[in-house]
Image (cartoon, helix red, strand yellow):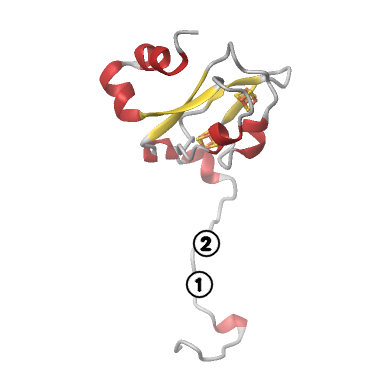
Amino acid sequence: MKIGEKVQWNELLTGGVIEDPGNSIDYKTGSWRIERPIWNKEACINCMFCWVYCPDSSIKVDKDGNMAGINYDFCKGCGICVKECPKPGALAMVLEADIEKKGMDVVFKETFGGK
Ligand code: SF4
Ligand code: SF4
């Protein structure tokens, strides 16, 4: 087969095949991140914009339908949730390297002012 050559569908070469739909749960893609969103529960208004916009379904929801945190096993650190969050101080992106170096408590306080 050559580029530009017309072929029938059944002459096409087989590409990537997913034989077990839903298998993305088995692949923890959070290790791709260089930044992560952190959540300040005290400032959150539970509007759930972050849940609506997250492309990786990484926003956790509790039984009452409220924001319940971030699933870092799958969050790839795209930052969309932070961009769309309407409440200042509820979500922020921080560097993974900073968390590793200083610890989450320090980074949280530096980001949200200890609230
Ligand atoms: S950073 Fe991206 S992938 Fe992670 S929770 Fe926010 S929207 Fe979802
Ligand atoms: S978008 Fe912001 S304020 Fe709304 S639920 Fe998410 S973290 Fe809370």
Q: Is residue 23 left or right of residue 105?
A: right
Q: Which residue in the structure is indicated by mark 2?
A: 17
Q: Quadrant of residue 60?
A: top right
Q: Is residue 68 left or right of residue 35?
A: right
Residue 68 vertical placement versus 114 (above, below): below
Tag 1: residue type?
A: Thr
Residue 39 vertical placement versus 73 (above, below): above
Q: Which residue in the structure is indicated by mark 1?
A: 14
Secondary structure of the residue carrying tag 2 is loop
> How many C-alpha atoms fall within 10 Å of the one at disc 2: few (<14), some, or many (≥20)?
few
Outermost residue toward the right? 64
Outermost residue toward the top? 115
Query: How far across and down, in percent of the image, does residue 9 sit?
Result: 61, 81
Q: Are marks 1 and 2 in contact (CB under 8 Å)?
A: yes
Tag 2: residue type?
A: Val
Q: Quadrant of residue 53?
A: top right
Front-most of residues 17 and 99: 99
Query: How far across and down, in percent of the image, does residue 7 sit?
Result: 57, 88
Measuring 53% from the left and 26% from the top, which residue is drawn there? Answer: 70
